[in-house]
Amino acid sequence: MTDHELDPATAGAPRAPRRRRRVGRLSGRDKAVVAVLLGLPILLDLAFIWGPALGTIGLSFTKWNGVGSLSTKACLPNVPSILSNGCLYGVQNYHQALTIYPEFWPAVRHNLIWLAVFVFFATPLGMFFAVLIDRGIKGSRMYQSILFLPVMLSLALVGIIWEFMYSQNYGLINTVIGHNHNGNAIDWLGNPKLNLWAVLVEATWRQAGYVMVLYLAGLKAVDPQLREAALMDGTNAWQTFWKVVFPVMRPINIVVMVVTVIESLRAFDLVYITNKGINGLELLSVLVTSNIVGETQRVGFGSALGVVLLVISLVPICTFLYLTFRRESQPKGAR
Amino acid sequence: MTSPRIPQNFERPFTRRGLFKGMGAAAAFATVPGALAACSSSSSSKSTGNSGSATAPVTFGSNYSDASPKAAFAALCAAATAAGGPKVTINTVDHNTFQTNITSYLQGTPDDLFTWFAGYRMQYFAAQGLALPLDDVWAKIGGNFSAPVKTLSTGLDGHQYFVPIYNYPWVVFYNKSHFAEKGYTVPTTWDDFITLCKKMKSDGIVPLAFADKDGWPALGTFDILNMRINGYDYHQKLMKHQVPWTDAGVKAVFDQWAELMPYMQTGANGRIWQDAAKTLEQKQAGMMFQGTNQVAAQYVSDNAKLDDLDFFQYPAINPTYGQDYMDAPTDGFMISKKAKNAAGAKAILEYIGTAAAETTFLKTDQWDVGVATGLQAPSYDAIQTKSVTTIAGCKAVSQFMDRDADPAMATAMISIIQKFIDDPSTGNIAGLQNSAEQQAKAIYTS
């Protein structure tokens, strides 16, 4: 219906009665089904996604420690926090986050580094594994299982496994390279210059396997005749992949891209397991949690950080939605 | 190893129980008017604090989730019942989950009694009306405790809210055989301490085992240096932000620490304290400054030689304060404002606040000590016996930064002190102090 309305040639007076008649043709049962099928998801969406999101935005303008109720009074300046609670705080939370909260900008930077490593390293690595295995090299099933194994482990478990690798005095890596003495030990998880990269290795270890499986499924679905035709035309393996197979796999590429962005923005588990996301491992998701979950809560401040994360997440989400809808409407426009 | 702790920390916050408690709290804010009315009418009858009956059963929310304290706690409750108190149902929650959920727990449907900590950490919840005043309990048990212990149990409004059970000192540990073998002597002044550290370093030993991956252990070093240099009152004022973090006294603490840093185990931010304790056990390190609750406990769990372990008080720095103060964190119990059977809960606390109860609780404990005046339980080992005399010899004991200060400030200091450990140079200190002060302003005042 949308494309009719968009088309000036077909828009006009005769349109409306037809539409009404079409709706009128629905029986009472049809209407009930439509109401349930449409109403229920909308209700759930409002209750569990829009409700909390709007609630968070509202809370981000308050100062509240989770005790007692919220009021619409403005916070009193220069009094102890405990006496000025549940009050309206204006944009102070945002102001504090951007100016005096020392963890904020490192967290933003770390989130971006995380995204970059996933986009430019973990995902291509997974694709590379998938292509290699798809070529049917010897023992491909075994490699497939080994590379997929980390995906089946929870991220919490991945963090613990790597803790054994990275531990300064007792870890595998330092022991093997002989750097496990008190004088020369490499502090993989404690040195703020190293630990983000150490954790990104953990994350990549898992993410590459995940992308590999998604990609492998896509590759299996590619019509073998396309490759044969390309081979007949005399292309080499490189050209076959980039010029023939890769473009055919557009749907799977989009899925992989979305998964990559989502996984890097929601990164939390690994750093939380490693050191609760402090000392060089700050991420926005961790800052939200550490301010809201805990003994003395800074609900308003944590909500403000949550809103920042929401705004950042909206960029890839909007881009994805725009691309998807454009893709769907394009063929119709071409007709 | 310590890794088993980690999944606990991580996964338990999302247990069903924790979730329900959170939901309970959410429901308390957002229930239909009818339910809300029911809620308020029931709580108003309880706020008098004398509801219920001293013989009706009570519930006890416990964070003593590790096997050994859990068993000791069960024995304590059984003894309280046997001594004429009501029957106690214990609801144990993993200790990290318990602490994380405390706000929603106390506002939801809390147990009658719950385990908690002394200091500002107790006062914070008492001041917001989430705990029941225990003045009548203290009228009965007050004689069992010294004046400083009563102060620890007192809220900002002057009423008591807390009954303590045990504490433990933060001191410098060493292996007796190691000191005897190398001919080291226990230092009592800063100069002796540094000389000893130098000697150990030249002997190829790490002078001070040190770990701060969890963030909080190094707060202890800050606390003790602060109390040695600036005294107890300054510490309390700083924790309440009555002294700015940019003060010269704070700079003196960091400067003193920077002098000691070359003798502390490197890479502390990546090491868990359990691993640091192991280096002390293996005599790779000569000393370690932490609580008996950690070091002695680690010796026990590693089957290391506990009888070879000894400790001394942190050496004196400023002669005005000598070795007068230390961190001795105290754990104990409180009654929630929403308790269904406050009278029964008070009967239990009246028993717990006795030397006999503490003796029962500490029967299997090899590192904590009771707080009743002069208690020397028959089960005490050498560490515990010495702990009692050491704590008794202090003019005042503090609770630890995360118990004396607003916990949000302690969290901010964790990050600042980790940055200091990474770069203890003089140029870095002023920036860290400024950052601490800016965050303190945001946390303590609006």
Image (cartoon, coloured by chain):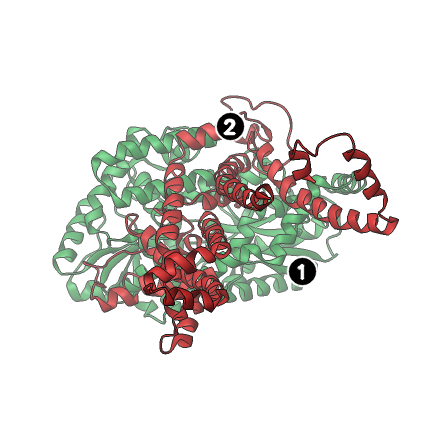
Chain colours: A red, B green
**On the image, which quarter does residue B161 sit in?**
top right
Residue located 38% across and 57% down the image: A243
Amino acid type of the residue that numbered disc 1 sits on in the rendered structure: Val
Judged from the image, the secondary structure of the residue bearing numbered disc 2 is: loop
B236 to the left or right of A89: left
Residue B408 sits above or below residue A260 on the image: above
Judged from the image, the secondary structure of the residue bearing numbered disc 1 is: strand
Work out whether residue B412 or residue A95 is closer to the camera in this orientation and state it: A95
B206 to the left or right of A23: left
Question: x, y percentage for residue B215?
Answer: 38, 49
B162 to the left or right of B184: right
Question: x, y percentage for residue B199?
Answer: 13, 55
The residue singled out by tag 2 in the image is A80
Which mark, residue B88?
Answer: 1
Chain to which the residue tagged by mark 1 belongs = B
B277 to the left or right of A318: left
